[in-house]
Image (cartoon, rainbow, N blue to C red):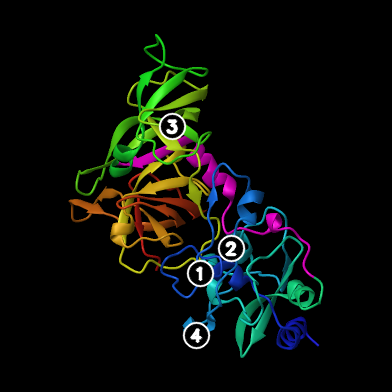
Amino acid sequence: MSLCTKYTTLSLRLTAVTLAAALVGCSSNPSASSYEPQSTTSTTQSQSDAAATRSAPAPYEPVLERINQPVPLAEGHPNEYVVQVGDTLWDIAATFLKDPWFWPEIWYVNPDIENPHLIYPGDVLGLVYIDGQARITNVRASTYRMSPQARITPLSEAVASIPFESVAAFLSSGVVLEKSQADALPYLLETRGDHLIASAGNEVYVRGITNDPLNTRYNVIHVGEPLVDPDDNRLIGYHGEMIGEGSLRRTGDPSTVALTNTSQEVKTGDRFLPASVDVPLNFFPRSPSSNIDGRIISVAGGVTQIGQYQVIVMNRGSNNGLAVGDVLTVFQAGVVVKDQVKGGDIRLPDEPAGTVMVFKTYDRISYGLVMEATDAIHLLDAVRNPT
């Protein structure tokens, strides 16, 4: 009996628990209306805490009905894969698939299993063929979870879609503030005592804090250079620099915040951003529901060339139809060259250079994580629907 036949028999006889439910059941994409959104997590939590807060999925509507054509498998793909500590669902999918963002289209799912939405290090994923179509199923988990014993592996070990550290590092070191967001954030009114500027150990009076409990932690943000949309020259936000941290000591208007850590002087007008920023770690990847044609307008770290797992900011957001989990292709802008035969300037075609997954949206901007970089990616490169 061949390996594929063996796994096919297992998947049909044993009620297979699948990786698809890990992705669809935990979806935070509003467009995936068949599923109950998962709980999101704070960037100040560890990845373990983040996974532990996820909620159980709603009943699963099979993905198989959406499949119109076979999903290409990766060259040299294995017949099985053992999930490792540190894996992400995107990386695992890339082991089997040529285009890993198609992962929900290939996982073999059984909707009768209660709460099958997590996979863990040590689970064995097997490539099988059902009705002539390639599928991937969680072979080890399917056998284990049918037993009368409860799984004792803690939720903290569950595999997330994207590397938490990459997103957390960006949100804890530098941000881009949408204009409406920046205008609404609490701001430093006055420093307590005879101080023109404040630093760690000082208390400051802050206006705009409402309903936050005592000891709430804040990142102190200095609002920097304006961010202009290159398509219409409209102001859409500001570069923000995190210059300190503080803790709420007294509520009211103004409130009192104690500065606990600073990297430079804190001044009147600096903004206070709650340190608890919700970022989902599991997505249901999909092509955007509307036509997207935007550009990269900022990148974490101020680098000129952008690589895998770097965070970019795009000049398109929820007003344009973007949602968490949407996948976009980055196109490197074609250069202008001289036509040596007929004369004149000719712009070369834009070329695909990578893949981005959206993980947070605002009205006119969104954050995306570069999942693949097949060529150099730069500021002002285009982001469009995948082809």
Q: Dot 3 corresponds to which residue?
A: 251
Dividing the picture into quarters, in which one does residue 88 lie?
A: bottom right
Image coordinates of residue 22 in percent, x first then y, are 60, 68
Q: Which circle marks residue 164 in the picture?
A: none
Q: Is residue 99 above or below residue 10?
A: above
Image coordinates of residue 322 in percent, x first then y, are 36, 60
> Of the residues shown, which amino acid type is indicated by label 4?
Glu
SS of the residue at dot 4? helix
Between marks 1 and 4 in the image, the one whose residue lies nearer the viewer? 1
Q: Dot 1 corresponds to which residue?
A: 36
Which tag, 3 or 2, sits closer to the chain's start? Answer: 2
Q: Which circle marks residue 65 in the picture?
A: 4
Disc 2 and disc 1: Cα gap in Å?
9 Å
Q: Is residue 336 above or below residue 131?
A: above
Disc 1 and disc 4: Cα gap in Å?
19 Å
Q: Are marks 4 and 3 in contact (CB under 8 Å)?
A: no
Q: In the rendered image, which quarter contains the N terminus?
A: bottom right
Between marks 3 and 2 in the image, the one whose residue lies nearer the viewer? 3
> Of the residues shown, which amino acid type is indicated by label 2?
Ser
SS of the residue at dot 1? loop
Which tag, 1 or 4, sits closer to the chain's start? Answer: 1
Disc 3 and disc 1: Cα gap in Å?
35 Å
Q: Which one is nearer the viewer's eye here, 70 or 184?
A: 184
Q: Residue furthest bottom?
A: 131
SS of the residue at dot 2? loop
Q: Which circle marks residue 55 in the picture?
A: 2
